[in-house]
Amino acid sequence: MAKFSLTGQKSCVWSNLSYLTDYNNNNFFTTALLYFVYVEILCIMQIKSLALFKKGATMLHNIFRLGMLLISWSTLLLYPKRAIKRFLPVTIFVTALVSILLVLSHPYKLWKVPGDIGTRLFNDLSFTLGPFFVTNLWVFRLAYGSLWQYLGINLVIDYLLAFPITKLFKKIGIYQLEKLKPIHFFSIIYSFAIFAYGFQYFFQKSKR
């Protein structure tokens, strides 16, 4: 049976996060962008190993989903507490928007998750409360206050999620889009990012 190791991936995450905490370096934005690209495609490197297993292995899929959840939250060990308080409301707001989309996905057949209702629920929660939730916290921490940086980072992340990552997830049986096309998926999640920035702007302004 094939085996894979996350040791190299964890060390890479740690080195990127440590570098991001140094605001005095001249390549801060470049490093931040590369980090979030890495977080979104981290699962791809795991998929290459998982794809060697028997197709439809629900247990392995759920282990993978749990891994995404735990790895995402582990990055918050380096997240400042004050920043969490500042950006938690907007992260909850945009997560709620995605949750509405998840609720609509089944009756409108936007996408399909192989397995029973428990598998579908775990799939939705592991993504929404894992990579999506944590990545939004980091994006606001690093880019809020510079609209173009914020839009640029989200453009790259949302493109990767809607196209290459979704394609790979379909290939190994994590989920697949049905009536919702990749371009529509990208447009929706990118619009959520824009709404989130507006929410944070007015929310912060109201507290002054």
Image: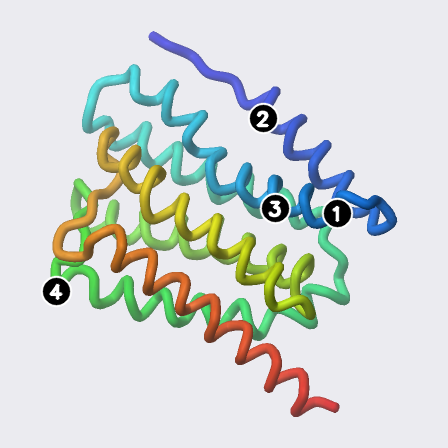
Q: Is residue 108 left or right of residue 155?
A: left
Q: Which mark is drawn over residue 9?
A: 2
Q: Earlier in the sequence, mark 4 or mark 3?
A: 3
Q: Which residue is mark 3?
A: 33
Q: Earlier in the sequence, mark 1 or mark 4?
A: 1
Q: Amino acid at mark 3?
A: Leu
125 versus 3 height, above or below: below
Q: CA distance from mark 4 to mark 3?
A: 36 Å
| Label 4 residue SS | loop
Expressed as whole percent of the image width and height from the top left, the position of residue 35 reads: 61, 41
Camera-near label (1 vs 2) is 1
Q: Is residue 196 left or right of residue 55?
A: right
Q: Which mark is drawn over residue 107?
A: 4
Q: Earlier in the sequence, mark 3 or mark 2?
A: 2
Expressed as whole percent of the image width and height from the top left, the position of residue 161 reads: 38, 46
| Residue that extends furthest to the right in the rendered view of this protein | 24
